[in-house]
Amino acid sequence: MTVGILALQGDFREHEEMLRRIGAPTLQVRLPKHLDQVERLIIPGGESTTIGKLLAMYGLIEPLRVRVREGMPIWGTCAGAILMAQRVVNGRADQPSLRLMDVTARRNAFGSQLESFEVDLPVEGLDGKPLRMVFIRAPVLEDLGDDVTPLARLEDGRVVAARQANMLATCFHPELTSDERMHRYFLEM
Amino acid sequence: MDKSTWTTKVGLAQMLKGGVIMDVVTPEQAQIAEEAGAVAVMALERVPADIRAQGGVARMSDPELILAIKEAVTIPVMAKVRIGHFVEAQVLEALGIDYIDESEVLTPADEEHHINKHKFRIPFVCGCRNLGEGLRRVAEGAAMLRTKGEAGTGNVVEAVRHARAIYSEIRRLQTMDEDELFTYAKNIQAPYELVRQVAETGRLPVVNFAAGGIATPADAALLMQLGVDGIFVGSGIFKSSDPAKRARAIVAATTHYNEPEIIAEVSRGLGEAMAGIEISKIPHDQLMAGRGW
């Protein structure tokens, strides 16, 4: 079961190293030909405008949407979550997107880098202690559709992780910590 | 909740990896850069090529300009301060931008001390020519490194020299025993703990981009193949004849640095690159890479 990691831009190597530690085979996905070789896909953190641009430039948007509709599990962290959302606020009007999950992603919901933070919070479906969440110029998820389940909320109630069938979105970066639980959760989806 | 931790500072640089950070001098240029796929912009009054041509003391840019650029884009905004000028850094932190470049491109304010970057909530990137210089900057709190190259020249040779120096030193470190590591750390004037960490992991403790003289998509891919994590382009884009097209091409070449067919495709019909300068023709006292200690 090869896990593809979209490697157009961003922290794809951190995801790759985490999956290697768990023992899951990985492949960097940069072009449509790579997509045919993977059974799952992670969209890493990075700049959603840049990744969206490169997705469109090299013809990845439609093949990816088709695979997800056919049931391929997909997980977006931060920029990846923005790219998966059907609606984006605070983005560029012309920002290319995959428009997969029935949520609104509010980009840079906390402000500039000075507002980036870490916090320990529980995630539904993860046993044990709360998860260390790293938020970097992070989005939040709003207007969740009926088919979308919130998995984690900040203390003020804003949703920062959600799932819709084979699609998982997290606004934080488990790949920047040493906690493997979120990656294991995705592998079992 | 912990704000501005080391993880969030280093983490933002990790999110920029595989991307291109572009120098811009107006909000319009910033939008062109964002539209072309830049992961961040460096807001400044003059690109290095103009600083070089016009001379005089180069300082932090006018906050008015930096804020106008911040307003114009949704991607992270960086700005430069003079080496050692911690008050310029306090000003940029107060403006709420995303990253500070303590840069040799500006005229140094302190010829002995760099900024103590641990004291700031905002993360810093610093230039380096070799491993020792890079690790000294990390010890001072830099959360990201870049090669110095020779800014404003359109000549990639110095950036290549610095990238090669850093990665060959890392490879050599991995073959040394502990006794040799102590001596090596002393010789390169870097903290032993950081040297040992690099020897163990085989990599720098923070993200390292290439900067200084990158003017073409092939220049960007060259540095990526040498092992850097991403690319800064200063004068190379907005001193060329078709900035938007060149910017898109450098973004594509940075992502697909191992695909010569794609680099060939995006390199076609880009128009004039910026005019370059032979490094040996630059008077010694006008070289920027030697600034920093």
Image: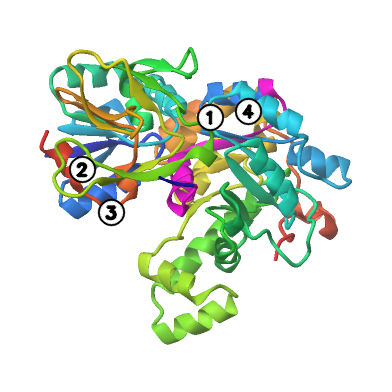
Labelled disc at residue A147: none
Secondary structure type for disc 2? helix
Gap between marks 1 and 2 measured at Cα: 27 Å
Q: Amino acid at mark 1?
A: Ile
Q: Which residue is mark 3?
A: A178
- Mark 4: give few (<14), some (14-19) or many (20+) Cα within 10 Å: many
Secondary structure type for disc 4? helix
Badge 1: chain ID: B
Is residue B270 visible in the rendered image? The answer is: no
Q: Amino acid at mark 2?
A: His
Badge 4: chain ID: B
Gap between marks 3 and 2 measured at Cα: 11 Å
> Is residue B278 placed above or below B15 in the rendered structure?
below
Gap between marks 4 and 3 measured at Cα: 34 Å
Q: Which residue is mark 1?
A: B75
Labelled disc at residue A183: 2
Given residues A187 and B210, the one toward you in this image is: A187
Q: Amino acid at mark 4?
A: Lys
Left or right placement of residue B222 versus residue A171 in this view: right
* Residue under disc 3 on the same chain as residue under disc 2: yes
Magenta residues span B4-28
> Is residue B195 placed above or below B45 in the rendered structure?
below
Q: Which residue is mark 4?
A: B70
Q: How many marks?
A: 4
- Mark 1: give few (<14), some (14-19) or many (20+) Cα within 10 Å: many
Secondary structure type for disc 3? loop
Reply yes or no: does residue B183 show up in magenta: no
Q: Which is closer to the viewer, label 3 or label 1?
A: 3
Badge 3: chain ID: A
Disc nearer the start of the sequence (3/2): 3
